[in-house]
Amino acid sequence: MSFTQALLEAIESLNGNKMRSGLTVLGIVIGVAAVIAMLAVGNGAQASITGSISSIGTNLLFVFRGAADGPPGGGPGGGDGRSGNNDRPLTLSDAEAISDNFAAPSVEAVAPAIQGNGTLAFGGEKTTSPISGVSPAYLSVRNLELAEGEFINEEHILGRMSVVVLGPETATAIFGHPDGVVGEAIRIEGQPFRVIGVLVAKGGGAMGSEDNNAYIPFTTAQARLIKRESRDEVDVIFVQARSAESVPQASEEIANILRQRHRTPIGADDFSVFTQQDFLQIFETITGVLTIFLGGIAGISLLVGGIGIMNIMLVSVTERTREIGLRKALGARKKDILLQFLTESSLLSLFGGIIGIMFGWLIAFAVGKVAVATGNNFTPIVGTDAIVLSTSFSAIIGLFFGIYPASRAANLEPVEALRYE
Amino acid sequence: MDLVIEARNLTKTYKMGEFDVQALRDVSFTIERGEVISIMGPSGSGKSTMMNTLGCLDRPTSGDYILDGESVAQMSDDQLASVRNRKVGFVFQSFNLLSRLTALGNVELPLRYAGITEGRRERAQAALEAVGLADRMSHRPYELSGGQQQRVAVARSLVNNPAIIMADEPTGNLDSKVGKEIMNLLLNLNKDRGTTLIIVTHDPAIAEQTQRVIRLRDGQLESSGVETKKGKQQ
């Protein structure tokens, strides 16, 4: 019997039991759709995170206190960079030493910062936001732009002046709009500050958007808002390399300077230098594990769908014992019967796979819509790898779970099968 | 003498738990090409076993069985399937048609398993015409009467031009008038085509219409050569 005939007969037979075939296909549809959607969400998360890390700038380096086991506190935007052990803290003089053109020729600019949180208030409106004590260099090093007003300058630093530059989200949170707020007086932790500038929205997500920050002069923060053990202690030093190519060299120069200053032997650093590449790698690993995890869970539902196919095929073989006996009496060989039932189970999983891909695509699309509607910059990505993976997986499942029922049918004794009631 | 069936010392033993049950004991007989034979015997006499063995659905435990020149006693399952396909046509008491297929599709089935694609439809149509169902080809079994269904089964049994047609109580599920029609159809086919016809039955009236009766009792041949009146006439 030829393959096309087997195919036609299988379609006829599946068609004869629409409800049952449909439900069996549904099991595979759910499995494949889940795999596709989960992988799409995982890939989308990865792309969104790596995208936002890339937007930080390719020639940026971060220097933290503590040995390099990983970035502390989830990144420069989040934690305070203090590891709390015997490591020597980073200081302003460390930052100064790094900006030395002779010791560190690959370094373009240096911006030390201390970071904390505080409540901002204007009139009745209140918001809590991250507050950074920064130097004038911060603007260019972090690649920020002013929407209006000015940034913190040397005068503000020297005078420990009560001035603040707001991120656009912070401005919107307390004023209701991000523009025309320069000159207003707000309170940070109860102390009066004058708004001197508002930044342009930069977006981002993975490392916390910096649009909701508030920036005050380093010295002001040190003296009045974010207390540290010593006067010149800093949480993080942002370093801008001369170019993207000189980043590894800059990292090496910074490490050498700090080793000398902290008198640590090589291999026992009490500081860590991260490049944007490092963060990229770390988050790619994290999202990679997440994607595999999600895909694995979805894979289990695909497995359950496969067991559903096996179950239905076993019922079908039992129901059609007489038919199998008759076919054998008419001259069907073992492989004819085997082919007949394998075709049926493969068709079930193939239909399920095709519908599942479309369905999964739809789910991914919907997740993307929801994400956009809730203001997250996140697009699920349905990759060809996910489609190929789930299609071949469902086809294999159809074959694998079809083989046992089909071989049971093929090995029926014609005499027994014909006698079966 | 042209022998189509030659059975030598056929023995079939079934294991029923700890006991061996001998369904056939040392049975030997021959059937000539073109003969019409009936196999009779009370239930438990080995009738069904005999039919399964002659129809190549099962192998004898020992002994030799030569069908149309081929010794089938030692054949593998797939070889037996091929022999059934080429040399044996089956007509069952309960018709055994596939309800999903049309009459034509059912008759085509043996040709499909024979790997015949060219002229398959025409041969199936010719077979249906031969049993008088030219106008029912695209009907499905549930749209046909019992007699018509059995006619389709007869068409299916002869579409491959087999050496023998095995009919197991072919009139058992039909009323006597329709049963008579089916018997006449089978006998006419034998007359026209010379196909050997073996009918398993417990109905003496049916046996009476065949040329020779093989009687079984307790797995043994009671008689293998009782010629009926009809047989004597010919």
Image (tube, rainbow, N blue to C red):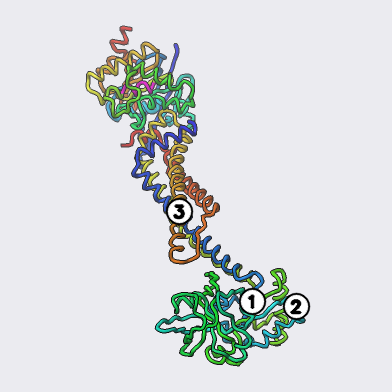
Please determine whether, in this image, residue A85 is positioned above or below residue A406.
below
Chain of the residue under label 1? A
Residue A204 appears anywhere in the view? yes
- Pick whichever, B154 or A261, lies toward us: A261
- Upstream in the sequence, badge 2 or badge 1? 2
Residue B221 appears anywhere in the view? no
Q: Amino acid at mark 1?
A: Val
Please determine whether, in this image, residue A321 is positioned above or below residue A263.
above
Q: Amino acid at mark 3?
A: Gly
Please determine whether, in this image, residue A215 is positioned above or below residue B221.
below
* Residue A242 spot, x, y in % from top left: 71, 73
- The quarter holding residue B12 reads top left
- The quarter holding residue A200 reads bottom right
* Residue A420 spot, x, y in % from top left: 33, 36
Q: Which residue is mark 1?
A: A141
Q: Amino acid at mark 2?
A: Pro
* Residue A214 spot, x, y in % from top left: 52, 81
Q: Which residue is mark 3?
A: A360
- Upstream in the sequence, badge 1 or badge 3? 1
Secondary structure of the residue carrying numbered label 3: helix
Q: Residue at x 27, y 18 (%)?
A: B206
Q: Is residue A333 magenta?
A: no
Question: Callout 3: 10 Å neighbours few (<14), some, many (20+)?
Answer: many
Q: Which residue is mark 2?
A: A105
Chain of the residue under label 3? A
- Pick whichever, B184 or A375, lies toward us: A375
Secondary structure of the residue carrying numbered label 2: loop
- Which portion, as a residue range, is magenta? B150-157
* Residue A415 spot, x, y in % from top left: 38, 33
Where the C terminus of chain A falls, by quadrant?
Answer: top left
